[in-house]
Image (tube, rainbow, N blue to C red):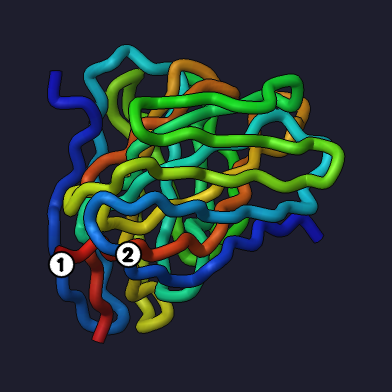
Amino acid sequence: KNQVEQSPQSLIILEGKNCTLQCNYTVSPFSNLRWYKQDTGRGPVSLTIMTFSENTKSNGRYTATLDADTKQSSLHITASQLSDSASYICVVSLLTGTASKLTFGTGTRLQVTL
Amino acid sequence: NAGVTQTPKFQVLKTGQSMTLQCAQDMNHNSMYWYRQDPGMGLRLIYYSASEGTTDKGEVPNGYNVSRLNKREFSLRLESAAPSQTSVYFCASSEGPYNEQFFGPGTRLTVL
């Protein structure tokens, strides 16, 4: 069964600190891996999209890495800010015939405090 | 650009009632999607429309119907609501099936 597992489930860090969120997946055949940020009460917003040939991709203070061999991805947040408090969702795209099928992780809830 | 808009934002229904959730996008995207998000679970695809004039079932289609009214609009209908359909519903759109998906703000539905 295609699955996406994220860890930790939740995380609390002090403002200004760095953190790394993990994502393991078993989706195959794999098309791409996406990280989304979801603020409370809002829809998810895309942070990065990586194909299997990409090892790393950055979007400001967010850097995603991908190891397609071990089927692991991480999202590193540098110099965290209060506005980074949100759920971060790892999403893996299954390569299908006419449309992609996305498998969503349950997310890591990050809280950044003073 | 408003992006993806959804109406209503909140809705309370009684078991057996029907309603339609509306979704519109102004990005000229070809593909549109309906998801539901439940506590402790990842978003799950209900139905999608790869292009205008086509619709297909996703992972959890039972109890729902959809209409791709035109390129901009994709509606989700609950014919006879059940408490198990209490959830937050998100509409999304993308240029094509493999492109980045843009999500709407969601509709929080409670079925009593």
Going 51% across and 61% down the picture, which residue do you hit? B42
Residue A13: image tag: 2
Q: Residue at x 77, y 26 (%)?
A: A97
Q: Quadrant of the C terminus of chain A?
A: bottom left
In the rendered structure, which amino acid carries the disc numbered 1? Gln
For this rendering, which residue is in front, A48 or B35?
A: A48
Bin the neighbour count of mark 1 within 10 Å (Cα to Cα): few under 14, some 14-19, many 20 and up: some
Q: A108 or A102: nearer the eye?
A: A108
Q: Chain of mark 2?
A: A
Q: Please name the residue shown 40% across and 26% down the image.
A: A59
Hey, which residue is sitting farthest bottom in the picture?
B112
Q: CA distance from mark 2 to mark 1?
A: 35 Å
Q: Position of residue B67 (x, y in %)?
A: 39, 38
Which tag is nearer the camera, tag 2 or tag 1?
A: 2
Front residue (pair B37, A65): A65
Residue B4 image point, x, y percent: 24, 32
Decide if residue B39 is in sight here: yes
Classify residue A107 as left or right of residue A101.
left
**Residue carrying label 1:** B11
Residue B66 image position (x, y, % from top left): 42, 45
**Label 1's element?**
strand
Amino acid at the residue labelled 2: Ile
